[in-house]
Amino acid sequence: MKQQYKEYLKLNKNILLGFLASITVSAIVAQMFSNQQSYVNATITLGVDYLVYFSTFGTLFYFDNKKKYLLKTGEVDKVGLRRDLVKVISSLGIGEVIYTICRWSLQYYLLTNSYPAYGASLISQSISTVIYMIIVNLSVKLMRLYKDGP
């Protein structure tokens, strides 16, 4: 398998594991705040979602890529690291804007239509994550983060 495709698989694995951790914690938090107004519940749940997701994703991404930017001398390839970090952050940022809008509005809508808090959280996060993954993968592809050759 080409190295390029292995990199895409590692990125998607990290996104999905981050999603699995955050969906679990978010559903619990949504239920804990089920007695709050719908907009408060959706906002708190989204904040917890981000905290858990980025902690998990960042840790996994670091461990998968820590050797990628080491030169033969043992020093860090700062130019390559900086270039790739800008591409990764840009790709994730584009996806996060769309994710935030979808996640918050879907959860708010479901809560105002009498869905249980944990169910609204699970449904809104699942739909938003699928959209997020499509956007991030398209962005990474367009920015040529994992290109072959020089």
Image (tube, rainbow, N blue to C red):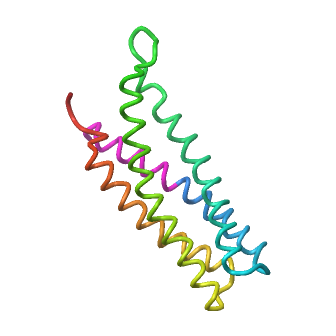
Which residue appears at 62% of the width and 74% of the height?
121
Which residue appears at 46% of the width and 61% of the height?
97
Residue at the far top in the pictured view: 73
Image position, residue 86 (x, y; %): 40, 38
Q: Quadrant of the C terminus?
A: top left
Front-most of residues 79 and 148: 79
Front-most of residues 105 and 63: 105
Q: Quadrant of the N terminus?
A: top left
Image position, residue 108 (x, y; %): 60, 80
Front-most of residues 75 and 105: 105
Q: Quadrant of residue 20?
A: bottom right
Residue at the far left in the pictured view: 149
Magenta segment, prevailing SS (helix, strand or loop) = helix
Report how many numbered discs are placed on residues in the image: 0
In the image, residue 100 above or below residue 4: below
Q: Quadrant of residue 120?
A: bottom right
Q: Is residue 100 magenta?
A: no
In the image, residue 59 above or below residue 92: above
Q: Is residue 6 left or right of residue 85?
A: left
Give the magenta range: 1-16
In the image, residue 54 above or below residue 130: above
Which residue appears at 41% of the width and 60% of the height?
133
Image position, residue 7 (x, y; %): 36, 41
Which residue appears at 55% of the width and 77% of the height?
123
